[in-house]
C-alpha cells in the first residue's frame, strides 16, 4: 500500500475560498459550520465521528466533503456481524489453490481498500460495531497499518481517513463506543436542521415550481412539531417532510383535486409521519391521533377534515404499512 503515489488530502484545501464552500453548501444545505470543522480535521489528518439523529444530513455532509476533496468514500454499515475479517478481506480460495498464498490472491475488504486507495472509510452506525472490530480500526487509525494474513503489514496511503456516523437514539446497538476509540476521534454533533434550512432541503428534494411554497412550509412545520410534542419521544426527520410533499403531489394528481385539499394533506401526513415517530411508553399506543391533532393545528385553514377522520384508537385512513424509512 505504501507504493501508492496518491498525495495527502491537500492541507491547502481552500478553507477560506468562499466559492468552493458555497458550492459544497448547495449539497449540504445550512451545514457550512460543520463542513468547515470536518474539512479542518481531515486536512490535518484527524478522524471524525458525526453524531446525530437519523436524517440530520450526516451522509449528505460526508458525500459533499468527499466530492470537494476529490476522494472516494468507502461505505461500511456497522452491525454486530462486522467482524475484523470482513473489514480486512480474505484470500480467494480458488486463486490460493492455483497459485498459493500471495498478495495477489488477497481480496481487499473495505478497510484495506480504503487504506490502499487513500480513500475515506465511512462507518455508518458506529455504535453497532463489535469491540474487537473497533480495536482493529484503532490500530489502522493510530498506526496507519493493518496486518493482512499471510501477506504482512499493509501501510496506509497518506490520504487514508476514517469518518464515522452514529445515532444517539440508537437502542439496537452496543451502547457507547469504547473509550479507546472515542479518544482517537473528534466528534461533530449534528442536530436537526433549522426551519429555514429544512424548507430549502425539501424544496431541493421535490422541486418547488409546481407547488407553491405553502405546502412545503406546512410539511416542514408539522414534521418539526412531531419533535416537540409532549406525547412523542422521537419525532420525524426532514425525510418525513420530503415524503409528505411527494405523497401529497401524487394524491392530488390521482384524485384530481388541489394539493392543499384536506383529503390529500391528511392522508399524506399520516403516511409520511405515523411510521416515523416513536411515542413515550405508556402515554398513547397509537401515532395516528397524534399526527391528526398536529395536522388539525397546522393545516387548519385548509378546510374540513375528511368524513371519517382517524380518531384515537381508530384505524388509520391509509391502510397497509407505513412507508419504509430510508
Ligand atoms: N443539509 C442537507 N442538505 C441537503 N439535503 C439534506 C440535508 N440534510 C438532509 N438532507 C436530505 O435528507 C435526507 C436524509 O439525509 P441523510 O441521509 O444525509 O441523513 P443521515 O443523517 O445520514 O441519516 P441516517 O442516520 O438515517 O443515515 C436525504 O434525502 C438528504 O438529501
Ligand atoms: Mg446516513
Image: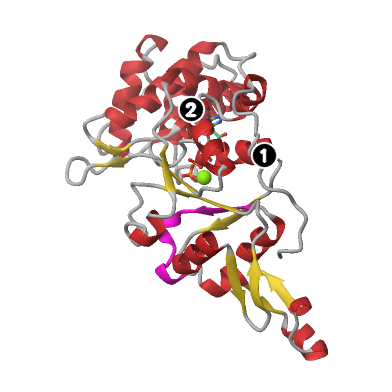
Measured along the vertical axis of the image, is residue 31 above or below residue 79? above
Q: What residue sits 72% from the left and 80% below the top?
A: 92
Asked which secondary structure carries label 1, the reply is helix
Q: Nearer the viewer, residue 149 or 127?
A: 149
Q: Would you say 218 lies left or right of 250 here?
A: left
| Tag 1 residue | 69
Asked which secondary structure carries label 2, the reply is helix
Question: Residue 252's x, y, as percent?
Answer: 57, 21
| Tag 2 residue | 33
The Cα atoms of the two marked residues, 2 and 1, are separated by: 17 Å
**Which comes sooner in the sequence, label 2 or label 1?**
2
Locate residue 18: give its quadrant.
top right
Q: Would you say 215 lies left or right of 65 here?
A: left
Name the outermost residue toward the left. 282
Q: What residue sits 34% from the left and 59% below the top?
A: 179
What is the span of residues highlighted in magenta in the rendered image?
120-132
Q: What residue sits 61% from the left and 29% below the top?
A: 27
Q: Nearer the viewer, residue 237 or 1?
A: 1
Q: Where the N terminus falls, by quadrant?
A: bottom right
Amino acid at each position: 500500500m505504501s507504493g501508492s503515489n496518491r498525495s495527502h488530502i491537500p492541507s491547502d484545501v481552500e478553507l477560506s475560498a468562499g466559492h468552493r464552500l458555497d458550492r459544497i453548501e448547495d449539497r449540504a444545505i445550512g451545514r457550512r459550520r460543520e463542513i468547515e470543522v470536518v474539512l479542518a480535521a481531515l486536512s490535518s489528518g484527524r478522524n471524525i465521528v458525526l453524531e446525530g439523529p437519523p436524517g440530520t444530513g450526516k451522509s449528505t455532509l460526508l458525500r459533499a466533503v468527499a466530492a470537494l476533496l476529490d476522494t472516494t468514500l468507502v461505505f461500511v454499515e456497522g452491525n454486530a456481524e462486522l467482524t475484523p475479517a470482513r473489514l480486512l478481506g480474505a484470500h480467494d480460495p480458488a486463486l490460493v489453490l492455483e497459485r498459493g498464498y500471495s498478495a495477489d490472491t488477497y481480496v481487499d475488504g473495505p478497510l484495506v481498500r480504503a487504506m490502499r486507495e487513500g480513500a475515506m472509510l465511512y462507518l455508518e452506525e458506529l455504535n453497532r460495531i463489535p469491540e474487537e472490530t473497533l480495536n482493529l480500526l484503532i490500530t489502522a487509525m493510530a498506526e496507519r497499518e493493518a496486518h493482512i494474513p499471510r501477506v504482512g503489514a499493509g501501510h496506509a496511503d497518506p490520504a487514508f481517513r476514517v469518518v464515522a456516523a452514529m445515532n444517539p437514539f440508537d437502542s439496537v446497538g452496543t451502547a457507547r463506543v469504547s473509550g479507546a476509540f472515542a479518544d482517537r476521534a473528534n466528534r461533530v454533533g449534528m442536530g436537526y436542521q433549522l426551519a429555514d434550512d429544512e424548507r430549502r432541503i425539501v424544496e431541493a428534494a421535490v422541486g418547488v415550481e409546481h407547488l407553491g411554497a405553502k405546502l412545503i412550509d406546512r410539511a416542514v412545520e408539522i414534521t418539526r412539531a412531531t419533535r416537540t410534542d409532549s406525547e412523542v419521544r422521537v419525532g420525524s426527520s426532514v425525510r418525513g417532510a420530503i415524503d409528505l410533499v411527494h405523497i401529497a403531489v401524487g394524491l392530488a394528481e390521482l384524485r384530481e383535486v388541489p394539493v392543499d385539499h384536506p383529503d390529500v394533506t391528511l392522508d399524506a401526513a399520516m403516511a409520511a409521519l405515523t411510521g416515523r415517530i416513536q411515542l413515550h411508553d405508556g402515554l398513547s399506543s397509537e401515532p395516528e391521533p397524534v399526527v391528526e391533532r398536529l395536522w388539525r393545528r397546522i393545516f387548519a385553514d385548509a378546510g374540513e377534515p375528511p368524513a371519517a377522520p382517524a380518531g384515537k384508537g381508530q384505524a388509520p385512513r391509509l391502510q397497509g404499512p407505513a412507508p419504509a424509512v430510508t
